[in-house]
Every structure is written in C-alpha cells, then in structure tokens.
C-alpha cells in the first residue's frame, strides 16, 4: 500500500485519515502542530502521541523529507543556496535571501521544468516530476532549521512552473498560510509564472492575496517567441487581458519580470513598446540583467542599457525596479547550482 503524504494534507484530511486508523479526532491538531508549527522531521519526535500511534504512522505515512546535499553561504550578504535531495533521489535547489524587511526563501515547485524558456537552466533536461505540497513546505522548514532564521516570505521562483503543478501549489499556499502552522502572510508570497492564461484565470478565482509575477521578457509576441515557447499558445494580448482581469478580481498589483539579454530584448524601442502596453495597468516591472547560462550564448545587457531601459519605462509612467543581485560570490542563480552538481 502506498504511504500517505501526511505533510501534504489539510487538517481535516489528517483527521479523516486518523479516523480510518481508529484514532480520536483531537490527534489531528496535535499532528498538524508537530508538522507545521514545530516542524519536526520524524514521527519519533512527536512525543505527545502514544508509541503505538507513532508506530502506526511510521508504517502508513511519510513526512516527505528533503535532506541537505549541499549548502553554500555567501560571504557578501549571507545568502544561502541549498541543494536538497528528495526521497526518490531527485535533486532540487532553494535559496534563502536576507533582506532588511525579512528573510525570503525561493523554492522549487517541480524537479526541472517543461516550459522550455531558452535562457533558463532549469528546463534544459525537461521536467522529471512535480513536487507535492509537503515537499515545497519541507524546503522552507528545513532552511529554517538549518539556518536558525525565521522565514517571513516565499517566492515560487525556483525550478518548475508553479501553474503547471496547480493543485499541489494551491495546497502549499493554503498550508504555509495556515494559522496553526507557519502562518506566513499571503502578501509575503509571490507566485511567478511564465504566463499560462487559463491557469491565471483560475488563480484569480481562488480569493488569495498573494502577489502574482508574470515572466514577460519581451514587448511583443515576435520577440517573446524567440525565447519562450509558451508564448505560442499564450499570446501577449490575451495574457495581458488575463492580467487585467486578475487585477480587477484581486485588487493586487502584478509584477512583470523582464530579463534583459543583450541584443535580444533590450533596445530602447522595445522599452517604449512595452511601456505603451503597461502604462495603464496596476503593475510594476522588475528588470533582471539575465544570468549567463553556459549552455546558451546569452549575455546580460550592459549597466548602461539596463539604466536606459528602466528610465524609458519610468518616464512613461511604469513603475520599474532593477533586481539587486544577491549571493553573486556563490555562483549559480536560477538552477545553475543544481546543474553543475548533476554534471559532476
Ligand atoms: N516558471 C516560473 C517560475 C520560475 S523562474 C516563471 O517562468 O516565472 C523565476 C524567474 O527567473 C522567471 O522570471 C524566469 O524567467 C527567470 N529566469 C530564468 N532563467 C533566468 C536567467 N538565466 N536570468 C534571469 N532570469 C531568469
């Protein structure tokens, strides 16, 4: 019999599972507390449960642990990059970033990715599988334990396309926000998507207060299709319409991500074209000088071009920031640490 992924269950689901085991309902809250508030990584740590229940759980359930394979700590800013091993031996990457306003963790939602963006290291070997809600939570819990730091926010910007793993990601969002668990404020959660229109529409109906980030990386379909295969089935006009509707439904400002690649998408004309499309929207553009990916021939835009691009957007009324780079001394942004590890 396949084991139950206990960390991926809502409280009510744990209670139903316990009922099947012939256990009283109140044990559900105790277990939920061990998993999501105390965040223990073994059943034997759950000391207020009877020994026989702990043994029963051992036989029928799993805690979907992630174990640290490697951790690099930046001397410059304290950023920590983690490689985690999953139960089946797969490797994923997560990052702890320290900001003045609190600690944020970047987590993976899939092992690899199948979206095929040409500038992204996570997609080179395709997707191996999607992560469960529990495996997403475990990345945060394990980082908290290892670093001794409380995590205040999370960005779903590690490997994987969150909206390609929709149900588990929704479950993760609700569990990480649960008042009896990590209790992370929804406003401290950012979900980043390459722009799957039907899923954005679905997300708008969930009644969540998270921040949606959309990876645009181009001012029009022609340029976008060069680097993002997903642009073929999700044209920009409809994508921006879905974003408008998302804003109208949720009253939340959207972030558009734009990785600047020299000679590909960083001209002044493109900046003006983009501004024209975004200026009336409740949004914010985050410019990221592209991280070099060895496997591709992309070079990041010069500082001068990044500044010019930002200035044009701002002059046209589009709020714009340039992403500050953290942990540059420990290599490996966007899935590159995992890749270099796997090639050894
Ligand atoms: N699949 C989601 C989330 C994961 S990637 C998405 O596409 O949004 C998080 C962000 O990093 C995305 O905006 C992605 O386009 C960007 N990214 C990927 N590779 C990059 C690189 N080499 N340089 C800069 N940004 C990159």
Image: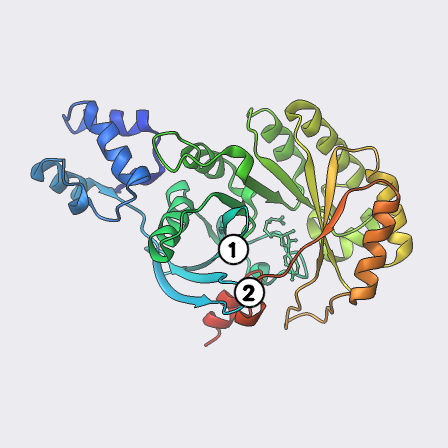
Question: How far from the left and from the top, in percent, is residue 80?
Answer: 46, 61
Disc 2 on helix, strand or loop? loop
Q: Residue at x 64, y 71 (%)?
A: 295
Side of 82 where 291 appears, left or right: right
Q: CA distance from mark 1 to mark 2?
A: 8 Å
Q: Which residue is mark 2?
A: 327
Disc 1 on helix, strand or loop? strand
Whether residue 115 appears in this view of the structure is yes
Q: Which residue is mark 1?
A: 97
Side of 198 where 92 appears, left or right: left
Query: For the C terminus, which image quadrant?
Result: bottom left
Instruction: Count the marks.
Output: 2
Numbered circle sitting on residue 1: none
Question: How far from the left and from the top, in percent, is residue 133?
Answer: 41, 41
Q: Residue at x 16, y 29 (%)?
A: 21
In the rendered view, would you say 132 is above or below 79? above
Whether tag 1 and tag 2 are in contact, CB under 8 A, the answer is: yes
Side of 29 where 105 appears, left or right: right
Quadrant for residue 43, please give it. top left
Q: Categorize mark 1 by other alpha carbons within 10 Å: few (<14), some (14-19), many (20+).
A: many
Ligand 1 positioned in quadrant: bottom right
Work out whether mark 1 precedes mark 2 in sequence or the reverse, and give the earlier one. 1
């Amino acid at each position: 019999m396949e084991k139950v992924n206990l960390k991926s269950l809502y409280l009510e689901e744990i209670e139903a599972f316990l009922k099947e085991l012939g256990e009283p309902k109140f044990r559900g809250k105790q277990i939920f507390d061990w998993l999501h508030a105390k965040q223990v990584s073994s059943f034997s740590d759950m000391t207020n449960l009877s020994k026989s229940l702990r043994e029963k759980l051992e036989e029928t359930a799993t805690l979907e642990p992630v174990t640290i394979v490697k951790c690099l700590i930046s001397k410059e800013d304290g950023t920590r990059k983690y490689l985690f091993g999953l139960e089946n031996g797969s490797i994923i990457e997560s990052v702890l970033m320290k900001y003045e306003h609190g600690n944020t963790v970047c987590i993976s939602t899939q092992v690899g990715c199948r979206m095929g963006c040409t500038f992204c290291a996570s997609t080179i070997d395709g997707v191996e599988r999607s992560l469960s809600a529990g495996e997403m939570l475990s990345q945060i819990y394990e980082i908290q334990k290892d670093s001794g730091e409380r995590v205040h926010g999370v960005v779903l910007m590690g490997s994987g396309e969150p909206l390609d793993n929709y149900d588990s990601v929704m479950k993760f969002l609700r569990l990480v926000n649960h008042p009896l668990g990590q209790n992370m404020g929804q406003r401290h959660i950012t979900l980043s998507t390459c722009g799957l229109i039907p899923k954005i529409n679905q997300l708008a109906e969930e009644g969540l207060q998270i921040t949606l980030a959309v990876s645009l990386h181009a001012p029009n379909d022609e340029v976008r299709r060069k680097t993002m295969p997903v642009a073929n089935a999700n044209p920009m006009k409809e994508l921006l319409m879905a974003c408008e509707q998302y804003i109208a439904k949720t009253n939340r400002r959207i972030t558009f991500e734009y990785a600047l690649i020299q000679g590909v998408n960083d001209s002044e004309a493109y900046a003006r074209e983009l501004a024209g499309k975004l200026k009336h929207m409740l949004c914010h553009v985050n410019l990221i000088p592209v991280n070099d990916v060895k496997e591709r021939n992309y070079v990041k835009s010069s500082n001068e071009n990044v500044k010019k691009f930002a200035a044009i957007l701002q002059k046209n009324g589009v709020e714009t920031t340039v992403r500050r780079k953290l942990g540059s001394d420990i290599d490996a942004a966007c899935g590159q640490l995992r890749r270099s590890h796997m090639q050894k």
